[in-house]
Amino acid sequence: MNTVLTYVVSLFMIVISVFTTLYIKSELERVLHEKTDTVPFHICNIVIIIMASLLAHAVMTKYVMGNKIDLMLQIVIHMFMIFPIYILGNIAFEKYKTVYRKYLTTENRKVVVLNEKYLKKKKRFTKLNKYNAVSKEK
């Protein structure tokens, strides 16, 4: 039971780390104006996720359960846990980015078409409709 709890906590850390690092990667690519995925960002993401999951596993194993840690075995096990989650998370994140993209651009970076799904996703507060109603009446 202790081992199952340890791996559940590690899996929880992996899922949180995957989506956090993928979001940061996409923001860095946007800031650096990268059009394609860059391999160094993926490598850094995997290293960060391994460190976070091994830290959670080590804390649960050593301090909560009181057992010894076999680090090399845990690295291999965590790699087999991380790769499928990271690949599926990356596919889902890229699909989400393409569906809810703000607009399409041409090669010279001019806006061609606004995306309807992005505009529908951005719901405005209903209070803002009446916010400036007094000035519109005048």
Image (cartoon, grey):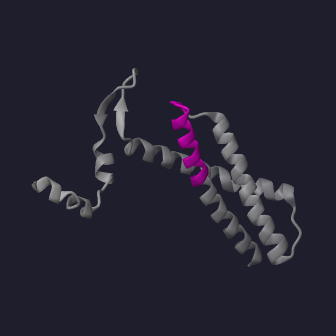
Decide: is 13 above or below 93: below
Res. 17 image quadrant: bottom right
Q: Is residue 39 left or right of residue 93?
A: right
Range drawn in magenta:
19-36
- Residue placed farthest to the bottom in the image? 1
| Residue in the image at 55% along x and 48% along y | 23
- Residue placed farthest to the left in the image? 138
Q: Is residue 133 left or right of residue 99?
A: left
Decide: is 39 above or below 88: above
Q: Is residue 77 visible?
A: yes
Which of the pair 103/129 is nearer the observer?
129
Image quarter where the C terminus lies is: bottom left
Magenta stretch contains residue 122: no
x then y, percent, for residue 48: 71, 50
| Secondary structure, magenta segment, majority class | helix
| Residue in the image at 69% along x and 43% along y | 44
Q: Is residue 9 left or right of residue 20?
A: right
x then y, percent, for residue 92: 49, 49
x then y, percent, for residue 129: 21, 59
Magenta stretch contains residue 26: yes
Image quarter where the N terminus lies is: bottom right
Which of the pair 110/134 is nearer the observer?
134
